Image (spheres, grey):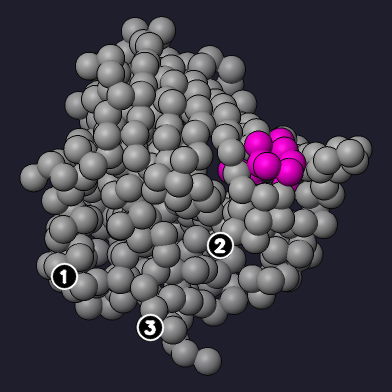
Amino acid sequence: MSEPLRLGVIGCGMIAQAHAAAIRLLQEDGVVRAVAAADPDDDGVERFAAIVGGLERRSRDGLDIVRDDEVDAVVLITPTRFHRDYVLAVAAAGKPLFTEKPLAPTFPVVRELCTAVAASGIPAQVGFQSRFHPIVRRLREIVETGELGAPMGYTLRDDQYWPTGAIVPGHTSWRSDVAEAGGGALLEHSIHSCDVLGWIFGPVSRIYGTKRHVFGYTVEDTAALTIEHDNGVVGNLVTIFNGVRGREERRLEVFFEQGALELTTDFVVGAPEDSLLIQRPDQPAERVDVAALRAEWFTRDGCDPERQVWVYQFFAHRAFAQSLQAGRAPSPGFADALHAHAMVEAGYRSCERRVPVELSEVLGDA
């Protein structure tokens, strides 16, 4: 067995606790070892350390992690506006990188980072953990095998409580500021859905969008996109940040030549919202046993289905470590993130112009 991958973590805020839970499980398996963490908030570092079970080194400066010779790979979990400097530093250092999404607040910086990472040749993965959800994977399998014929269209609704301090006491508020976050419900939250839609239905050609600012922040809390894929599939995405604390749900309906699917997912393993309904011609709708489906996919991934895994970040980090051990490119990578960001950017441009925007325009920008 190879030595555990030594991880250095930059950023120990709220979402880092989910990553810490994932890393702890992987430490138990001897796959990784968290050796260092950095954040200007000492309490945040201590919370992270308490979950992973201790750290050898702590710092207030993330660049200490990048320069640390005892760190094999960097995990970047800072607010979005800090990503640029750290991604460029990691690329220059030649170290593997696992980074949270979005990559940056603005699309030109996203392009800059994707170019830098590609030029450096470092293995780099982006935290689109929805790809590891068994229900989402089952949908992709149905599309790829043609089990229900060709997909025709879909509608996706993506909603979450507003992740800002004025709505959720004790929560950080940077996501409500366009200067820090770059965008609201569409960029901060539904870039996950944009990634999933491109992964399942293929590259996107054109988007028409509209948005609202109901809560009065400088980023949108409501957005709707009409999406056209290169292969002709059409769909709608509606994304919402609202004041319903404790709610976080994605509902997707997909229509095929010979069937229809209704699926609901959350970001937590075994969430009560999880469901999958399959309708075939002249048959009663089949309500899939999602617990059995989850066990099947966990087994396929070489994971004990009885194990208590709480967050899908576990599978994302596991895939990252395994790709490095096997010498293959991590997935989803920066090219995948570029496509998802291009969808979001096309949506924002369409909102401003009130006309459809081609992805070729966005991706062709210098």
Numbered range of the magenta stretch: 255-270
Q: Residue at the spot x=40%, y=45% of the render?
A: 230
**Which tag is nearer the camera, tag 2 or tag 3?**
3
| Dot 1 amino acid type | Ser
| Residue 92: quarter of image | bottom left
**Residue beneath label 2, please?**
315
- N-terminal label among 3 and 1: 1
Q: Nearer the viewer, residue 260 or 287?
A: 260
Q: Which element carries disc 3, helix, strand or loop?
A: loop
How far is disc 2 from disc 1 in space, using C-alphas? 26 Å
| Residue 180: quarter of image | top left
For residue 17, side relative to residue 97 (left or right): right
- Residue 93 x, y percent position in the rendering: 15, 71
Residue 345 in view in this figure: yes
**Residue beneath label 1, please?**
120
Q: Which element carries disc 1, helix, strand or loop?
A: helix
**Residue beneath label 3, please?**
327
For residue 339, side relative to residue 299 (left or right): left
